Amino acid sequence: RTPDGPPVFQGYWTNDSFTALERPADLAGKELFTEQEAAAYLKKRTDQLLAQPKNDIHYDDAIWQTENYAKEPNRRTSLIIDPPDGKLPAETPEARKRAAEMDRARESADSAQGRSLAERCISWGTVGPPMIPPTYNANLQIVQTRDTVVIIHEMIHDVRIIRVDSRPHVGRQVRSLAGDSRGRWEGDTLVVETRGLNGKQWLDHGGLPTSDKLTVIERFRRPSVGRLEIELTISDPTYYTKPWTVMTPLRLTPGTELFEF
């Protein structure tokens, strides 16, 4: 714990995971793996990653293998824990329209600005909020003071600042990619509310869209010395018919350094 009492979150962490955001169709109705099933699923996904043809590799970690840790099995069959079926809630008509526009933009563009922020390596959206695991470079450093929690990400070198000093949110007219995060302690849980997002960020590396109505509530907990978990609830009435919740596990990786992106 810190001298002021809250748990220490400071250190180097990874949220690397092969667990899908949504529960796969062949696992419908199954919330948790057994330990043996989780290990078998991890082996299957690892084998798929490393078996990519040498002339058609899609993920850089299959080339570099730079992470100095092994991926670990996760007993959850999806990162989404609510809705209980592990699926995204129904999309709104506006969401379907936006998805069609994004599909067309992937095919062609009039300029570089017509390409996505992720393709241009400006932001992947996975650095938060919400902090949904990317496919690689899933490493981060947390620096903690009494008034501030700073999260430094290896993926596209983003730095996120969470104020924990009771100051109010900035005005609603101020909007940005990462929004305005304010935290408070509820016992040993750090509860962070983020507003003021500008709708240009993705929710995950796959391109789930957001609007400027998005708000995110995160609950940071440290269940054990080597573990951190973040439960995050996403509310965006423009694109999703109801809020949905993700549980992201993190592992402490002592001795790690973040590489410049």
Image (cartoon, rainbow, N blue to C red):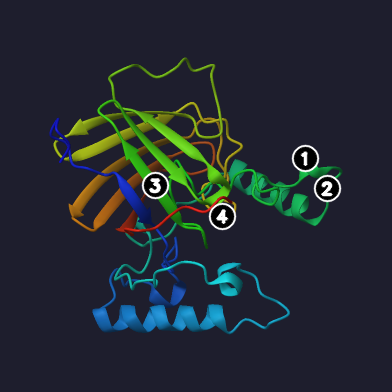
Circle 2 is placed at which residue position?
A: 109
Instruction: Give the crowd class for mark 4: few <14, some 14-19, many >=20 residues within 10 Å.
Output: some
C-alpha gap between disc 1 and disc 4: 18 Å
The mark total stands at: 4
Give the structural element (helix, strand or loop) at label 2: loop
C-alpha gap between disc 2 and disc 4: 20 Å
Circle 4 is placed at which residue position?
A: 205
Instruction: Give the crowd class for mark 3: few <14, some 14-19, many >=20 residues within 10 Å.
Output: many
Amino acid under label 4?
Answer: His
Establish if 110 lies above or below 107: above
Residue in view at x 39 percent, y 80 percent: 41
Give the structural element (helix, strand or loop) at label 3: strand
C-alpha gap between disc 1 and disc 3: 30 Å
Residue 204, percent across and down?
52, 52
The residue closer to the viewer here, 171 or 98, is 171
Amino acid under label 2?
Answer: Ala
C-alpha gap between disc 3 and disc 2: 36 Å
The quadrant holding residue 143 is top left
Give the structural element (helix, strand or loop) at label 1: helix
Circle 3 is placed at which residue position?
A: 141
Circle 1 is placed at which residue position?
A: 113
Q: Is residue 46 visible?
A: yes
